[in-house]
Amino acid sequence: MEFNTYTQEDIFGKRVLMRCDLDVKVNEDGIVDQYHDLRLERIVPVVHQLFGYGAMQVVLIGHRGRPDHKDMSLSLAPIRDRLADLCVSEGLDEPITLIDDISVDPLAHKHEPIIMLENLRFWPEEKAGDSLFAEKLSLWGQVYINNAFGNSHRADASMSALPGIMDRAFAGPELIKEVSTLESFILEIKKPFMIVLGGAKISTKLPLIEALSSKADAILLGGGLANTVLKARGKEMGESLVEQEMLSDARDLSDSAIILPDDAVVAEGRAVSVDEIQPDEAMLDIGPEANTKFVQLIQEANTILWNGPMGKFEDSAFEKGTYEIARAIAQNQQARTLAGGGETVEVLEKLDLVDKIDFVSEGGGAMLTFLADGEMPGLGSVKI
């Protein structure tokens, strides 16, 4: 896939409006810590480049969470603070001004080098893809850059309507890197090819499973995905997280490549067979037998794709499955490895394994959507 790319001539003396992926997790202290700031780290060199090209101003836009109104608990203020710190650490000392009213005259702020507009999802028009809302946003810049691969599977106003309004619309370096890496990953699969999928919902992963099941030697399922498929196959899952509305679809997943855990970790860290989960119990991690089997398959792989934890990893009693999977993938240096998704990246950050994975995608849903289909709404207006 080829994109419109900008040059110094396109940027010099311009106000640049850059759509970024600002949807990062804020910890219980109300800050973005080092385990959740990978997306922000990747914004800094692009801002550096734009100012190096002579940009007059860089206006950063994005969203956080899923508010349907102005919910200040999802303000971008902590995102702004962390990004400002990262910029300073890389020699970019300009303050970042947070604007909470996008209807003000942008030119009243033309002397502020870096601006961040408040959470775009505070306005319902963003999710609705509203063109009038996009026109308001367009007043904040002369050049548009989509550098938000992680949201490019959404037809939000800032992703699809806005670039069509702007005189110049380009793909950003991180978006281009994401797409080219994912394209080459699919084209250059070396067998054995293992896909490791976890997380809460099988509905978000089903298109990928259907698209890649014929290429995969094994699809290892954990988390809520495994719970739902096990339930669909007649297992008593008790109080486990199950996507009830997907049971019929899960029942149709008869592909021989799908590997389900044979045992589970339930309350108090007790391991039981998946045939022995009681009505008042929940599967919160894959069990030791499943862990051993999954790790062995990962060790034998030449290509590995990972998205989603194996269970409730944020609780130390149920972190072992996810952490051992992460370590096994990182330790397989013969394999080409790709990982993505917010919780997946969080695990890699906590275990200091990001540099051990060939490519860590900024996107979770976007990565899965692109790998399954190759087309996304946010890419159309910035590609050639």
Image (cartoon, rainbow, N blue to C red):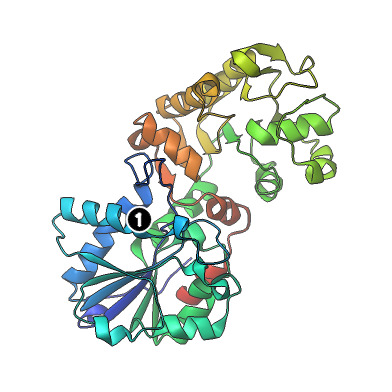
Indicate left or right for 129 with 264 as reference. Answer: left
Tally the numbered discs.
Answer: 1
- Image: 196 above or below 363: above
Residue 338 in view of the camera: no
Indicate left or right for 39 with 375 as reference. Answer: left
Tell me the amino acid under the disc marked 1: Ile
Location of residue 194 in the rendering, given as x and y in whole percent from the top left corner: 58, 33
- Image: 65 above or below 378: above
Which residue was labeled with disc 1? 79
Q: Nearer the viewer, residue 10 or 165?
A: 165
Q: Which of 370 and 345 is in front in this view?
A: 345
Determine crowd level at label 1: few under 14, some 14-19, many 20+ residues with C-alpha closer than 10 A: many
Residue 37 in view of the camera: yes
- Image: 203 above or below 352: below
Q: Nearer the viewer, residue 6 or 318?
A: 318
Q: Quadrant of residue 309?
A: top right
Indicate left or right for 220 with 142 as reference. Answer: right
Q: Is mark 1 on a helix, strand or loop?
A: helix
Indicate left or right for 72 with 111 as reference. Answer: right
Location of residue 262 in the rendering, given as x and y in whole percent from the top left corner: 71, 18
- Image: 268 above or below 323: above
Q: Which residue is drawn at 44% across and 65% down?
A: 119
Location of residue 185 in the rendering, given as x and y in whole percent from the top left corner: 49, 47
Q: Residue at x 51, y 35 (%)?
A: 303
Location of residue 288 in the rendering, given as x and y in whole percent from the top left corner: 60, 13
Q: Which residue is drawn at 24% across and 76% down?
A: 57
Q: Quadrant of residue 16?
A: bottom left
